[in-house]
Image: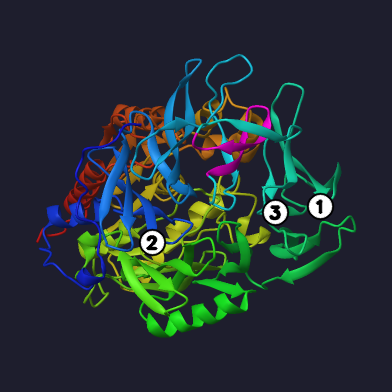
Amino acid sequence: MHTSLLALAALLALPSAAGAAEQHPASAESLAAAFGARPGAQSPELSPDGKNLVYIAPGAGQQTTVNVLNLVDGSIKTISYANGKPLKLVHCGWSAVDRIVCKLYGIAKLDGVRTSWTRLVGFDADGSKTVALGRPNAFNQANQYDGEILDWMSGTDGKILMSRGLGAEMVDTRTGKGEVVKPETGGGWTDGSGHVRIIGFDSAKDSGMLTGRSLYKYKLVTGGDWKVFSRVDADGNGLVPLAIDGTRNLVYATQKLNGRDALYSVMLDGTMKTDLVYAHAEVDVDGVEMVGRRDRVIGLRYVTDKTHVVYFDPEYRKLAASLGKVLPNLPVVSFVSTSADEKIVLLFAESDVDAGHYYLFDRDTRKLTEVLIPRPELIGMKLAEQRSITYKAADGTEIPAYLTLPPGSSGKHIPALVMPHGGPAARDVWGFDWLPQYFAQRGYAVIQPQFRGSTGYGEAFFNKNGWKSWQTAIGDVTDAGRWLIAQGITDSDKLGVFGWSYGGYAALQSNVVDPNLFKAVVAVAPVTDLYLLETESDHFTNANLIAKSVGSGAMRTMGSPARYPGQFVAPVLMFHGDQDINVAINESRFMNAALLKAGKQSRLVVYPGLDHQLDDSVARTDLLKQADAFFRVNLKIATP
């Protein structure tokens, strides 16, 4: 970490510049650059006194920079950077009004195996006096993960509670020195005042291989021995702690109820008194909303077609209602950070047609001020509405999805893409999404199916998972394409498929089960062979869990598109970073070679030095341009 001399790119909109707009030519190159650009303000955090804001911004290539915005005079300083080779900045916060702590992440080899690494460093608000906050292991060797922050504490003295080495330590971020406060544990949940109250253990066999089961223990506020809180089996049954309310001496936890995750409160006074807080009849409780340096729980959230928040805290409930009136066009509001006294609140507001704005709210003056715009390149551009729809799968099941049509389009007989999400244990959420928005700007209709195997809809919809039940999941994806044709949104010769990660797998496997449906296939970092996917985890403790998740026997073979290249009719374009540890690049290379050997049309674009996310503006811009050009040729679309 060194003090950076790089100038900060124009990515900030202060109050005086709010609402400024630029003219954006609709050329393929300019649109790809606008949507491919990494967000210009990431992970912002308010200082304890509410006078400064630290955030991460992209630099050249894979570089990331640390920036401090003075909220009093509006000045911005780039105080440090990471070059991305291999470490990049992922989050920064404040241990005092003049001291910043940042977490870095990167991919490097350990004993010949490519794996992830993290590092924690502290430095003054001007970028000086850098101190490494991690600790070497018992053999005085570098740890893969050198520490985690458990509690940011008050922000008055530069001390934070960390998990590192011997256990939980109160660490002085100015010196790096720590005092062990809980030698029996190195992690867990705190009460917001520096006391670890719950710890978790992942069950493992004698070989060290994880079983998928977990054990959680808790401690009384008065101390004493650890007591069993819950045991969670490999299917997720049991109480899973989320956050502790230290003032009420309870923990919020999820547990299955009628096949869906519900939220409970559990007393930590020895009685384990458990009360249902909230359950939804159709979807899972997604998590809890927390604010402030103590991660105070103020509500819960769940997602139907849109995200909903149920506020426990009356003040934030009132504030959210007021913001809904002040910012009616930005209905998705989240409270990001606050000053130590919570009088200054940083919030983020967005919608499907607005990439979002960070606002500062002063509780005393009731003033709302825009301070950051993550995607200034899109200001003034008319974005496409993301509609919530459902369609019937072949077995009659209603499948939720999002449909995005080009701005001003009739929505009839236009080129279209099916865009399944990654995971598969994930789901799309209503709001700004750079990929469908880009393709909508280029004239495509985009449908994002929440295929069975997606999370958030309960156990029955999860259907084991998208690997074991790939036939159902892929059937839902292909049915989305058929629905587009049946609705007259597109024609059979103008339908393509685009997917990333599991979405890339779905894009490829769709062409095994229904070779004539899609006329062009783009897969980014795709899984292509379920045997390879299992092999990739051989050196890791979750190898047994991966093997279990992908199933076995004939279904695994049949679910591996690289083993059926002869089935493909449509041309294939793949993209992959060569540092990907989520899905190894060998998967795409294997698929590409198999397709070419079978005489099929296939091309693989490799991005050196990039991981699964392709977190590089130049690479993402290139991906968008090449994918669009590929679809235009193969779907026979005139280029504007």
Residue depicted at x 40% and y 44%: 508
Q: Position of residue 594 (x, y in %)?
A: 36, 29
Disc number for residue 256: none
Q: How is the image coloured?
A: rainbow
Relative image position of residue 210 (x, y in whole percent): 69, 32
Sequence-wise, which precedes: disc 3 or disc 2? 3
- Residue on which disc 3 sits: 191
Q: Amino acid at mark 1?
A: Val
Q: Which mark is residue 481?
A: 2
Q: Main secondary structure of the magenta part?
A: strand
Which region shows up in magenta? 158-174
Task: Say which residue label 1 marks.
Answer: 221
Question: Observer-nearest residue: 12 or 380?
Answer: 12
Asked whether 427 or 252 is in front, the reply is: 252
Q: Earlier in the sequence, mark 2 or mark 1?
A: 1
Which one is closest to the eye, mark 3 or mark 2?
3
Q: The C terminus appears in which quarter of the rendering?
A: bottom left
Tag 3: residue type?
Asp
| Residue 48 placement, left or right of 129 | right
CA–CA distance between discs 2 and 1? 56 Å
Instruction: Kindly identify the amino acid type of the residue bearing the numbered disc 2.
Output: Gly
Residue name at image x 71 percent, y 65 percent = 262
Q: Give the residue displayed 38% in from the left and 61% down from the top.
A: 481
Residue 273 in view of the camera: yes
**Mark 1–mark 3 contact, CB under 8 Å?**
yes
Q: For the residue carrying disc 1, how many other residues have a C-alpha within 10 Å: few (<14), some (14-19), or many (20+)?
A: some
